[in-house]
Amino acid sequence: MGGRDVTAQNRKGPVSPMRIVLANGSLINHQQSGGHWSWFLQYPLGFKDIGHDILWLELMQSTGRTDTDARILRDFFDLTALYGLDKICAVMVFDSHLDFQSFERCQAVGKSKEKIQAAIGDADLLLNFCCAVRQPLLSMFKRRALLDFDPGHLQICALSWDMGIADHDAFLTIGGRINAPECEVPKLGLQWQTFEPSIYLPMWRTAGEPGRDAPLTSVTHWTWEEIPWRGQNISVSKRTAYLNYLDIPRRVHRPFELAAYIDPDDSTGDRELLAEHGWRIVHPCDVASSISCYQKYIRESRAEFMCPKPVHVRVKKGWFSDRSIAYLASGRPVLAEDSGFSERIPTGHGLLTFRDMDEAIAGVAEIDGNYSRHSRAAREIAVELFDSRRRLEAILSACEP
């Protein structure tokens, strides 16, 4: 089935104030991941900014230890308080795996179960981030929208794993080309609409030029994961993506750095291989353990060098990274391997693309040769295309019956 594109603008005009539940299940156990927290906080901060009534519902599986759970919960609410969000948060703690979520069997923290139940009943809309809310809890919401931030990976996994995707009323994905005829992402018989990631601009400030000695960087996972697809295995690993450009630091004589966790006991030799080819590797907890550290790391970078998971390129879905938008909002140019996003996002100034090593090398030279122009253009792209004041209203319009 087809779908409609809501990325260009909100065609229905401003949306009246709504009661919205934002549901997530990944932050409470990743409290030293400044990049991951930064991704999610754009949404509660952005929705509050445009006048909507928000409940942030975080789902947690108990560790089985009362003292450990208490520490995790305390730290979570301390972090949310830094951004004035602790009063709109509630955590639902489940003893069993999060694949089955019974409201009756959960423990509520931050708000009473009665208040959570009332908020669910009053909510105009659930925005369910990455299938965080599952059944039977999911059915308690009147209207349910899925926000897909890992297109392709999600849909391919759903072919063999029931995540309750079809139990939603609206299906939104950042896979901008999901409805293109040549896109290979399985639609699952559903009508997908596209949206762009959102950036809450007051969180991000620019800084002066960092100098030529500042590295091109990115913050990334480093895994070996593959998923079966059409008789073969397809990589969903940033490791594979970056190793395709292993030699670029030596080719351009510029510093490149990845904030990626590679286990010191890793037996593949990846750390040594990267070092031999001129890459610097830093631990994410050393440079991005909090949102403020993450923001500082981006500002101190020359630019982002972004290689998407091979699955994003393979299935031609037009994915663009929320992390890259954070670089743009910080006035840092982005040099990104094109997954098809250049069909809808202007490139050439501030955001440059490549498809092979030669184009990547040319992109580095272009950024170095015209850095001030690309820095200004980077911020302009974030303001003009990804501002939460525009993007979030478009999401809500897409979720209307």
Image (cartoon, grey):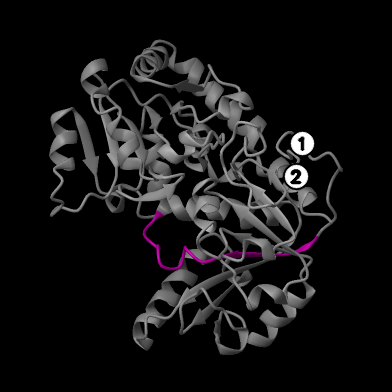
Inspect the image, locate mark 2, and give the three-letter code of the amino acid beneath it: Ala
Residue at 63% across, 39% down: 178
Q: Distance between the residues labelled 1 and 2?
A: 6 Å
Question: Measured from the top left, where is residue 156 in percent x and y?
Answer: 51, 51
Which disc is residue 121 wearing?
none
Residue at 60% across, 28% down: 381
Question: Measured from the top left, where is residue 223 in percent x and y?
Answer: 30, 49
| Discs 1, 2 touching: Cβ within 8 Å | yes
Inspect the image, locate mark 1, and give the three-letter code of the amino acid beneath it: Gln
Residue 112 can be seen in this image: no
Pointer 1 residue: 9
Q: Quarter of the image containing the N terminus?
A: top right
Q: How crowded is mark 1: few (under 14 residues within 10 Å), some or many (20 or more)?
A: some
Question: Measured from the top left, where is residue 181 in percent x and y?
Answer: 65, 32
Nearest the camera: 8 or 341? 341
| Quarter where residue 109 is shown | bottom right
Nearest the camera: 30 or 79? 30
| Quarter where residue 302 is shown | top left
Rendered view: 195 above or below 163: above
Start and end of the magenta stretch?
18-33
Residue at 63% across, 37% down: 386
Residue placed furthest toward the top: 369
Nearest the camera: 226 or 260? 226
Rendered view: 109 above or below 393: below
Residue at 73% across, 56% down: 170
User: Going by the image, does 233 lie left or right of 38?
Assistant: left
Q: Quarter of the image containing the C terminus?
A: bottom right
Rendered view: 381 above or below 293: above
Question: Measured from the top left, where is residue 117 in percent x and y?
Answer: 70, 82
Pointer 2 residue: 394
